[in-house]
Amino acid sequence: MTETLLPANATPIETALDEAIDPAAAINPALDYISGWKHSLQPSDLRPYLVHEFGMDVLLPFVSTYSGILALRRPWGEVRGTHEAVYQGLAVVGYSGTLLDPPARRLAWAEFQIDLDRVRDERADLDRIAGIVDLSIPERSKFRRGVHGYDVPAAEGSRTRWSGSKWANESGVRVNGKGPKWSFGRSYSHEYSLTQADLTALGIWIPEIDSQLWVDMDFLWTTADFQWSDDAERARRVSLATSLQEMPVWLRFADSGDQTIGYRKAVCHGVEQGLNGYAFGTDFLTPSLVNPLGVLVFARTDFGDGFGAEAASVSVVFGATVTDASRPGRLWLDPAGLVGGTEIAQLPVSILFGETVREHVQFLMRF
């Protein structure tokens, strides 16, 4: 015993009796055990009560285990209201990202966005991300937008009076019309070599040219759209690319049973290798009909196109006719939206359409 309540004038027998009945030797180990019980041992059956005692019930909808909440409690609680708390909260729900504050000069200076490390795994994750972020930020801040893979901000000029506000809107949609905006994008690139059968089906087949003589031309000179001095094989590729560019083109998305999910309006350009232009893998393809190596066909679905369906294949449809002419300009059509046309280059994919994700699909179709 290190302390005693005996007075300074205690007799020897009083001191001996005090030491004999001192319970410290029996209860000190238990007291030492209890002092670390809540903070280090945390038995599993006690964790729900500890979460409540520590005031961490607010995390229950966003963190799946009581041990996860208790592990987050002190580090997260000490920095709550800062960027670090947001990063810790994102890590708990399995994500990471970079928080971007708007310039202080903006009227909405407290509204920030987060560049996430990936497209959300599941739609339900969006509620978890938004919830943990809202609990981590200062009361005066607002989580405006989460992005990955597709981020188109509103246009903004200089700091003059003319450009004192943002122009138009930024990419993204809200789930159920509330909460932050979400703007995700994924890209898919495919190469395909156009065959004689493909070009014949499209009605534009031109035999490969072995001769440079005019008399061996397989078409009228009056319809040629290239110079007489051009290389014959280059002229052939120019003619093919020009013909494909002039056709209406759509991408057809189909499920595992080859049933059409929908059609997306596409763009077709003759291209050649370049240092800028359309990004394709690690290269760039520059729109050009001077010396095309093929055509680039591409389309980007809108948020919600095909929502709930999973595409197992995507193909290119040239020359089809829209069945509902009363609604021109539609970019996404249902399975009955097109008739006719020639379908080529059907390739396997795995695309689970989402209401917050835009899918960018490219076909480099070589001659």
Image (cartoon, grey):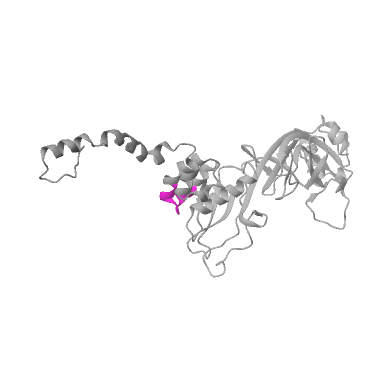
Residue 283 picture location, percent across and down:
63, 38
Q: Could you tell me which quadrant the C terminus lies in?
A: top right
Q: Residue at x 16, y 44 (%)?
A: 6
Please indicate, yes or no, whether residue 281 appears anywhere in the rendered image.
yes
**Along the viewing direction, whichever of 270 and 80 lies nearer the viewer:** 80
Figure check: 344 above or below 83: above
Position of residue 214 in the picture relative to residue 77 (left or right): right
Residue 234 picture location, percent across and down:
76, 37
**Along the viewing direction, whichever of 324 and 245 lies nearer the viewer:** 324
Figure check: 325 above or below 316: below
Q: Residue at x 47, y 62 (%)?
A: 104
Position of residue 54 in the picture relative to residue 219 (left or right): left
Q: Quadrant of residue 40?
A: top left
> Magenta region's main secondary structure?
helix
Residue 175 picture location, percent across and down:
66, 53
Question: What range of the chain is rendered magenta?
Answer: 76-86
Please indicate, yes or no, whether residue 277 appears anywhere in the rendered image.
no
Q: Could you tell me which quadrant the N terminus lies in?
A: top left
Q: Is residue 77 magenta?
A: yes
**Along the viewing direction, whichever of 114 and 105 lies nearer the viewer:** 114
Q: Is residue 218 magenta?
A: no
Q: Residue at x 58, y 51 (%)?
A: 146
Residue 66 picture location, percent across and down:
51, 41
Instruction: Specify the farthest residue to the top.
Output: 210
